[in-house]
Image (tube, helix red, strand yellow):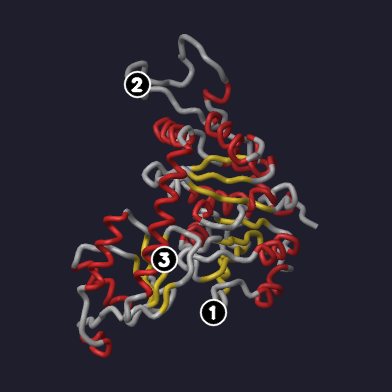
Amino acid sequence: MFNLEKIVRPNIQQLKAYSSARDEFKGEAEVYLDANENPFGSLNRYPDPQQTAIKKRLSEIKGVNENQIFIGNGSDEVIDLAFRIFCKPGKDKALTFTPSYGMYNVSATINDVSLIELPLTEDFQIDINSLETYLADESLKLIFICSPNNPTGNCFTKETIEFILRNFKGIVIIDEAYIDFSTKTSFINQLKNYPNLIVSQTFSKAWALAGVRVGVAYANSTIINLYNKVKPPYNVSALNQKAVLEKLDNIAQFEIEKNIILNEKEKLEKELQEIEFIKKVYPSEANFILIEVTNATELYNQLVAQKIITRNRNGLVHNCIRVTIGSEKENKQFIKALEKLSVTPNKVNKGTLNFKRQ
């Protein structure tokens, strides 16, 4: 049975959270002389440390209580705080699946936590048989599941994820950075069923606010209280909160832009499948496509020479590059760049790409 007290680090359980001036006084006043702020300027006041307006709006949109929502400085803060709250440095472990998002490894290393990386199957799914031996390890505190997965673009099956939630006594974090582009249902609606579940989302992808750096965690209120206890007092700026609220007040435009991206993805998938040197176009539930080619590094460099930047994922998935879905103009420019690359595949390692349409 899941026991949160056994998972949380003892020093975090005993931690008395910093109480900021804006935590101690809530409401409106005429004169503020409590926070050592400069009285001049338009951004001289500290932001709302609890991001109350954003949580209220998200609560209405997502159908969860405000006390089940944490707002972070990007979803990377959601990841980092999980290590700080649940993992004793040098003792505890975390687990994820590879290939996947690289920040799990970086955050684990920064926090001196051993990260187990289990390889996905050939069709990029979780091998339950390889996982079962780890679920009983009491030093394993966190499992990260990126779904839709980056860089592969696929979702993991609901049955597999629920098996992990049911059989793991630690915390399961489902990273849903790309869920808005997916046909699959978010695991937010499963929070009531799994007390060990954290769902992470972001405003960087479908909401077009990568420059704002705002992420969200959804969990039961006890876990959210732990996040609020450990986070810096003013972790999301006033400017960033304002930008998020403006987006949340214009969901119609969000839907229009999201559908444009999905339509562009469908067109791009078809065009890529017509290019002879592309060996495989992987199905995607995200706003990017993973493609297998003859020589990923050579192709990447050839595209850079044409001022087209993709992501070389050869180190994660052999001879694959990841292509983000851009605007219609950008996608056409990308396809034209591929069409310029022509000669023979067997010369590819000599610096000459010979690509052509079928």
Residue at image mark 3: 289
Q: What x and y, as percent, mark residue 106?
A: 47, 60
Q: Decide: few, some or many residues near mark 3? Use Cα within 10 Å; few <14, some 14-19, many ≥20.
A: many
Q: Is residue 42 above or below residue 329?
A: above
Quadrant of image for the C terminus = bottom left
In what element is the residue under mark 2?
A: loop
Seen from the viewer's position, the closer of residues 125 and 165 is: 125
Which residue is at 68% across, 41% downward? Answer: 14
Residue at image mark 1: 122
Seen from the viewer's position, the closer of residues 24 and 301 is: 301
Whether residues under marks 1 and 2 lie with C-beta atoms below 8 angstroms apart, the answer is no
Residue 290 picture quarter: bottom left
In what element is the residue under mark 1?
A: loop
Which residue is at 41% across, 66% downward? Answer: 289
Residue 93 picture quarter: bottom right
Quadrant of image for the N terminus = bottom right
Residue at image mark 2: 42
